[in-house]
Amino acid sequence: MLIKKIIRIGVLLALPVGLQGCLYMPTNGPTGEAIRAAEQDPVIGLPYAVVKVTPQTEQVLAAFAPRLAGGIQGRPPGEIRFGIGDVVSVTVFEAAAGGLFIPLEAGVRPGNFITLPNQNVDSDGNISVPYAGAVRAKGRTPSEVQRSIVDALKNRAIEPQAVVALIEQRTSLISVLGEVNTPARFAANAAGERILDSITRAGGPKGQGFDTWVMLEREGKRSTVPFGQLVYEPTSNVYAHPGDTIYVYREPQTFVAFGASGAQGQFNFEAWRVSLAEGVAKAGGLNDSSADPAAVFLYRGESREVAVRLGIDVNTFSGPVIPVVYNMNLRDPAGYFLATRFQMRNKDVLFVSNAPSVESAKLMQQIRLVTATVNDPIVAAANGVILRNAIKLAP
């Protein structure tokens, strides 16, 4: 009777393990099926969208890659225009002596022109020209100011012509600051220059560049790209415009890896960009004894615009950032090519789920442990019965 009771207790103990073992078995994270089914903790209740990584997915994300203001190529800056505080030189020519500026005894003069003293564009945006009065200069090019001067003098001077030159540029400036060797604010180049040219004029970046970022502020808008993108993708190296502020700073990019990868923890990019394939390799690859190659997941927050392009129903989410879980299938041989094109971003979370067979093996091992624990007193009791019988049969 004692042995039967022990067996009955053992069965009762093993039954819940068999039915609910997956609920409390030790594991490194959710299963792939649970992630794909978007199973949520009833307490946390944070919704997310699962997106399978395909060539179309990669193309959408590439289209929303960071770009500096100005688009893919960026428009070149226009002609330099005067601003308040600029120092301007004005020279007026006449066709013959005896006019408004050239006296009859012009032979004693070096030529048929007069150069006015250099002057600043005043707070009203004007310069002063004798007999022409205040001439608008702010926001205008030298040729436009020249035409205004000629129009004001043509009825008084003899076939007047004017030459307007910018002597000291104080408004059409570009500022470069941050992690550069010589932060400076300098005049924009009339011939046009690109962002890398401006950074070079400031002495270049202090660091090696792979963890350096460049932020461009233009007309109240900001955009940021890795420094390496300007170097390796010439289309990203847009023109600098007067009034631009270029801020260079260092921010190491990192990602974290969990689950059935070769190693877990936080890893530095140590490059201006890292593909998903490189990220998995940095984390030690997939664990051959536990990883499910079809269950490689990347957790990331995307903007609502990107989420719409990915085909996600954003109406079920609140806020500007949509939690997205990308699923990469590395069981497919072609998936490795796609993984080399899928770019990781700063603070991404990489998770590799265990294969279903691993969870089953853990469950069987737990059941075996419980049954072995139950079997020990059964064996001990049986041995005790045998011993007692042996004693009774002894002479």
Image (tube, rainbow, N blue to C red):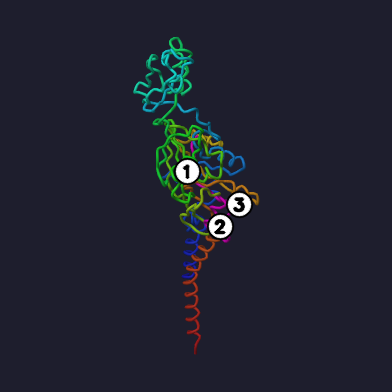
- Residue to which mark 2 is pinned: 285
x, y percent for residue 140? 45, 22
Inspect the image, locate mark 1, and give the three-letter code of the amino acid beneath it: Thr
Q: Secondary structure at mark 2?
A: loop
Number of callouts in the render? 3
- Residue to which mark 3 is pinned: 330
Q: Which residues are magenta?
A: 276-304
> Which residue does the image show at 58% across and 42% down from the upper left?
58
Q: Nearer the viewer, mark 3 or mark 1?
A: 1
- For residue 200, which numbered disc appears in the image? 1
**Callout 3: few (<14), some (14-19), or many (20+) C-alpha neighbours within 10 Å?**
some
**Magenta includes 381?**
no
Q: CA distance from mark 1 to mark 2?
A: 39 Å
| Residue 319 in view, yes or no | no
| Residue 94 in view, yes or no | yes
Q: Secondary structure at mark 1?
A: helix
Inspect the image, locate mark 3, and give the three-letter code of the amino acid beneath it: Leu
- For residue 185, which numbered disc appears in the image? none
x, y percent for residue 325? 52, 44
Which image quadrant is residue 56 in? top right
Q: Residue furthest right?
A: 333
- Please tell me which of labels 3 and 1 falls first in the chain: 1
Q: Nearer the viewer, mark 1 or mark 2?
A: 1
x, y percent for residue 220? 42, 31
- Please tell me which of labels 3 and 2 falls first in the chain: 2
